[in-house]
Image (cartoon, grey):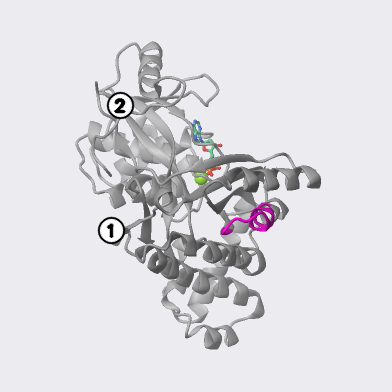
C-alpha cells in the first residue's frame, strides 16, 4: 500500500469527484473518503501461485474507485455504477458463505472475512465505479475486493499490512464468492507500486519485492489485448488443474510443486503418471521463467522479457492447456507483427494477452492482431497500452 497519494483524474473529468457526488446522491451524505484499487496483468508466473510459487504482476492504471462511509448500525449497503442500479442492503452479522449472490458477494465477502479473522468491523455504505474491464482476465474481482479491504482498514482503524489485506480479499473470493483463486491477484492489487513489477513468492507473500519495470526509458510499450472471450469450461478446469498439481506434489512427497527444482524435474517426471507430467513441467519451468525475468529486469534489460513471455505462452498452450484459439491467435499475430514477445495472462480459456513491443510499433502490432481476428471471424479485440501503476490506496482530499 502506498498511503495517501494523488487524486484520480481521467480524460473525461474527475472520477474521484464523480464517485463522491454519486455517493451523496445515493446515500444522502458525503463519503468518509474515496479509495482506489487497480486491476492487474501478470508479466510471467501463471498458475504458480496455488503451487506456492512465483509470479511477477504489475498493477494497471485502470482502477475500481470506492466511495465509502462507515455505519454504526451494522448495515452494509452496496451500489456499483457497473451494477443493476439497485442498492444491496445486508446485515454484517448475517453474512455467511452462500448468503449473497452476484457481484455483491465479492465486497460483502471482504467484510465477512475481516469479521471471521476477528477484526472489529461493522457496517458501511459503499459505492463503486470501475474502469477495470470485467471478466477480461484483468482481475476486476480482486480490484473490487481490495478496494473494500483498504477502505475498511482505514474506516475501522485496523492498520493491517498489505499482504494481510490481500489474504483477507483472497479469503473473500475463495470462501464467500466461491472462486478457488490463488493470492496473486489480490497481492498485485494491494502491494504493487508505480513503475515496478511485484516479485511475489506465494509461500511468503510478506517477502514480496518491487522490481523496476522500465518501459518508457527503454523505448518499450506493453499492450493488453482483451480477446473479449471467456470459455465456460474455465471454472471447472481451474479446479481440476489445481487438484492435479496437488496430487503430483503428494506423489512426489512435496509440500507443493514449488519445492521441485528444474534440475530435479526429469527424475520427477519419470515417477509421475502421464497425465500429470505436462502440469508439473509447466509449473516448474514457469517458476524458472519468473526467476529469469527478475534477473533480466534487475540488469535493466526489459526487452529480454520478450522471449520469456512467448516461451511461457507455449507452456500454457502445450503443457498446461489453458489457452484457446483466440489467445493463441493474438500471441501468434502479435509476434509475427514484430512484438518482442507475447503471452496470455490470467487463468486462461480466454481473457487477455499481453504483448511487449518497441515504442512506435503499438499500432502495427495491434492492427495485425485485429486483422487476424477479423479474418478468423472472431469478435474484435479491445487493445490498451498500459503502464505499471500504483496499488490500492486512499485518494487525497482537496
Ligand atoms: P475478472 O476478475 O478477470 O475481471 P471475474 O469473473 O473474476 O473476472 O470477475 C468479474 C466479476 O466481478 C463480474 O462478473 C462482477 O460480478 C464482479 N465485478 C467486478 N467489478 C465490478 C464492478 N465494478 N461492479 C460490479 N461488479 C463487479
Ligand atoms: Mg477475477
Q: Residues within 10 Å of mark 2 (few under 14, many from 20)?
A: some
- Residue behind mark 2: 74
Query: Image height check: is 286 above or below 83?
Result: below
- Quarter of the rendering containing residue 253: bottom left
Q: Nearer the viewer, mark 1 or mark 2?
A: 1
Label located before the other in sequence (1 or 2): 2
- Horizontal and vertical percent for residue 84? 55, 22
- Quarter of the rendering containing residue 244: bottom right
Of residues 3 and 373, the one drawn nearer to the viewer in this rendering: 373
Q: CA distance from mark 1 to mark 2?
A: 32 Å
Find out whether the residues at labels 1 and 2 contact each other: C-beta distance under 8 Å.
no
Q: Is residue 33 left or right of residue 141?
A: left
| Label 2 lies in ligand 1 vicinity (Cβ under 8 Å) | no
Q: Residues within 10 Å of mark 1 (few under 14, many from 20)?
A: some
The residue lying at 37 percent from left, 62 percent from top is: 300
Quick check: can you spot residue 159? Answer: yes
- Residue behind mark 1: 206
Report helix, strand or loop for mark 1.
Answer: helix
Q: Quadrant of the C terminus?
A: top left
Report helix, strand or loop for mark 2.
Answer: loop
45 part of magenta stretch: no
Q: Is residue 53 left or right of residue 133?
A: left
Quick check: can you spot residue 183? Answer: no
- Bounds of the magenta segment: 330-341
Query: Image height check: is 5 above or below 196?
Result: above
- Horizontal and vertical percent for residue 187? 37, 51
The residue lying at 29 percent from left, 47 percent from top is: 117
Query: Image height check: is 66 above or below 59?
Result: above
| Disc number for residue 231 | none
333 part of magenta stretch: yes
- Horizontal and vertical percent for residue 107? 41, 35
Amino acid at each position: 500500500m502506498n498511503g495517501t497519494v494523488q487524486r484520480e483524474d481521467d480524460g473525461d473529468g474527475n472520477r474521484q469527484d464523480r464517485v463522491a457526488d454519486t455517493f451523496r446522491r445515493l446515500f444522502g451524505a458525503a463519503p468518509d473518503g474515496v479509495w482506489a484499487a487497480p486491476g492487474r496483468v501478470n508479466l510471467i508466473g501463471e498458475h504458480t501461485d496455488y503451487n506456492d510459487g512465483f509470479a511477477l504482476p504489475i498493477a494497471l492504471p485502470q482502477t475500481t474507485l470506492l466511495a465509502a462511509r462507515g455505519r454504526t448500525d451494522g448495515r452494509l449497503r452496496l451500489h456499483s455504477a457497473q451494477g443493476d442500479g439497485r442498492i444491496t442492503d445486508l446485515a454484517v452479522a448475517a453474512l455467511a458463505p452462500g448468503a449473497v449472490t452476484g457481484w455483491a458477494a465479492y465486497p460483502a465477502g471482504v467484510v465477512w472475512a475481516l469479521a471471521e479473522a476477528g477484526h472489529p468491523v461493522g457496517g458501511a455504505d459503499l459505492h463503486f465505479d470501475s474502469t477495470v474491464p470485467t471478466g477480461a482476465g484483468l482481475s476486476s474481482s480482486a480490484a473490487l475486493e481490495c478496494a473494500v479491504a483498504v477502505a475498511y482498514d482505514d474506516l475501522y482503524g485496523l492498520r493491517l499490512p498489505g499482504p494481510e489485506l490481500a489474504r483477507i480479499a483472497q479469503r473473500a473470493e475463495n470462501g464467500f464468492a466461491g472462486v478457488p483463486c490463488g493470492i496473486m491477484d489480490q497481492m498485485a492489487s494491494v502491494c504493487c507500486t508505480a513503475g515496478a513489477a511485484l516479485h511475489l513468492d506465494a509461500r511468503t507473500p510478506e517477502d514480496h519485492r518491487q522490481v523496476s519495470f522500465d518501459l518508457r526509458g527503454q523505448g518499450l510499450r506493453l499492450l493488453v489485448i482483451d480477446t473479449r472471450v471467456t470459455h465456460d469450461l474455465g471454472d471447472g478446469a481451474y479446479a481440476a488443474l489445481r487438484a492435479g498439481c496437488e496430487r503430483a506434489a503428494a506423489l512426489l512427497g512435496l509440500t507443493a510443486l514449488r519445492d521441485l527444482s528444474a534440475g530435479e524435474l526429469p527424475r520427477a517426471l519419470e515417477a509421475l503418471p502421464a497425465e500429470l507430467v505436462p502440469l508439473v513441467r509447466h509449473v516448474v519451468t514457469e517458476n524458472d521463467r519468473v526467476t529469469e525475468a527478475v534477473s533480466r529486469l534487475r540488469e535493466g534489460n526489459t526487452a529480454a522479457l520478450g522471449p520469456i513471455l512467448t516461451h511461457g505462452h507455449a507452456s500454457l498452450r502445450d503443457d498446461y492447456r489453458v489457452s484457446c484459439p483466440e489467445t493463441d491467435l493474438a500471441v501468434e499475430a502479435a509476434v509475427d507483427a514484430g512484438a518482442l514477445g507475447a503471452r496470455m495472462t490470467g487463468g486462461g480459456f480466454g481473457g487477455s494477452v499481453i504483448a511487449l513491443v518497441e515504442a512506435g510499433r503499438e499500432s502495427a502490432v495491434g492492427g495485425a492482431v485485429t486483422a487476424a481476428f477479423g479474418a478468423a471471424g472472431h469478435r474484435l479485440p479491445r487493445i490498451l497500452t498500459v503502464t505499471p501503476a500504483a496499488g490500492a490506496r486512499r485518494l487525497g482530499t482537496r
